[in-house]
């Protein structure tokens, strides 16, 4: 297992959550883990964001005290979700809850602290708003990776902390496989959900309730 897979496995083990590493094969891509809880299975794929060529150059410059302004592009979140979706589909588990876990494996100097915002946009899309009657309201939504008709089997996209001790779930508002109110999710402390409000979909910190 690579570093990100080890960290996720250790976190699940620390919570006494039964899970099994799925054996890779040459014919089909597979997700990383099958997680079992109370007789139900969910499938988890962890995607590590490694430093690319430009970021490695930045790290070298910093190490040589050649500090310079730079901008880190974290839109690779979309590619991670896209790749994970192929793995869920090829393994034939889209009838079960599927979770994509993002882990920023880059050097601290080039980590992007906007990752939660990129994940929220990839999951729920971006709103177009208008100002009317003294308030801003959503009038249209531009979907990105997930939508009411696309990849609805993905239950959530999660962000694993750098030390692997905490995981934050951004629940898919369009999913056919919701996990937000499952007993499994109650074992984790950090959850966000895009909830319909008068202003449109609004990301809100929530706590699971047992179904």
Image (spheres, rainbow, N blue to C red):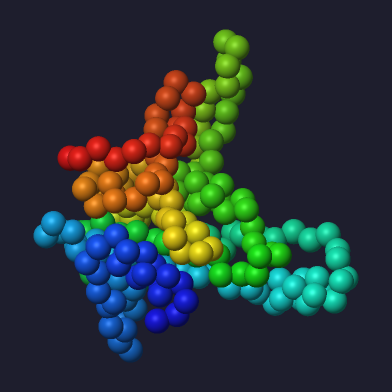
Question: Could you tell me which residue is drawn at 30 percent across and 71 percent down?
Answer: 33
Question: Taking 67 as reference, is 29 left or right?
Answer: left
In the image: residue 47, left or right of residue 74? left
Which residue, as the protein is rendered here, is positioned at the far left? 39
Query: In terms of depth relative to the viewer, which is nearer, 1 or 134?
Result: 1
Q: Nearer the viewer, residue 137 or 118?
A: 118
Q: Position of residue 129 (x, y in %)?
A: 57, 28
Note whether residue 65 is visible. Answer: yes
Q: Is residue 90 visible?
A: no
Residue for point 31% across, 84% down: 24
User: Which quarter of the figure is the N terminus placed in?
Assistant: bottom left
* Image height of 78 relative to 135, above or below: below
- Give residue 187's position: percent from left, percent from top: 29, 51
Q: Is the residue 160 above or below the residue 210 in the image?
A: below
Is 90 in front, or is 114?
114
Q: Quadrant of residue 136?
A: top right
Q: Nearer the viewer, residue 91 or 107?
A: 107
31 relative position to 20: left or right: right
């Amino acid at each position: 297992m690579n570093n990100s897979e080890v960290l996720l496995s250790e976190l699940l083990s620390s919570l006494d959550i039964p899970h099994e590493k799925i054996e890779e094969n040459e014919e089909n891509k597979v997700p990383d883990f099958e997680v079992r809880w109370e007789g139900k299975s969910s499938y988890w794929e962890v995607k590590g964001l490694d430093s690319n060529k430009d970021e490695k150059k930045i790290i070298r410059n910093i190490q040589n005290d050649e500090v310079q302004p730079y901008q880190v592009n974290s839109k690779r979140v979309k590619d991670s979700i896209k790749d994970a979706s192929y793995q869920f589909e090829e393994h034939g588990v889209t009838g079960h809850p599927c979770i994509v876990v993002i882990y920023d494996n880059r050097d601290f100097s080039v980590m992007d602290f906007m990752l939660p915002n990129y994940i929220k946009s990839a999951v729920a899309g971006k709103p177009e708003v208008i100002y009317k009657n003294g308030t801003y309201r959503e009038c249209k939504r531009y979907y990105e990776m997930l939508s009411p008709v696309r990849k609805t089997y993905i239950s959530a996209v999660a962000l694993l902390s750098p030390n692997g001790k905490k995981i934050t779930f951004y629940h898919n508002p369009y999913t056919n496989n919701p996990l937000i109110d499952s007993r499994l999710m109650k074992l984790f402390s950090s959850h966000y959900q895009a909830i319909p409000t008068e202003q449109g979909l609004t990301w809100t910190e929530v706590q699971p309730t047992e179904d």
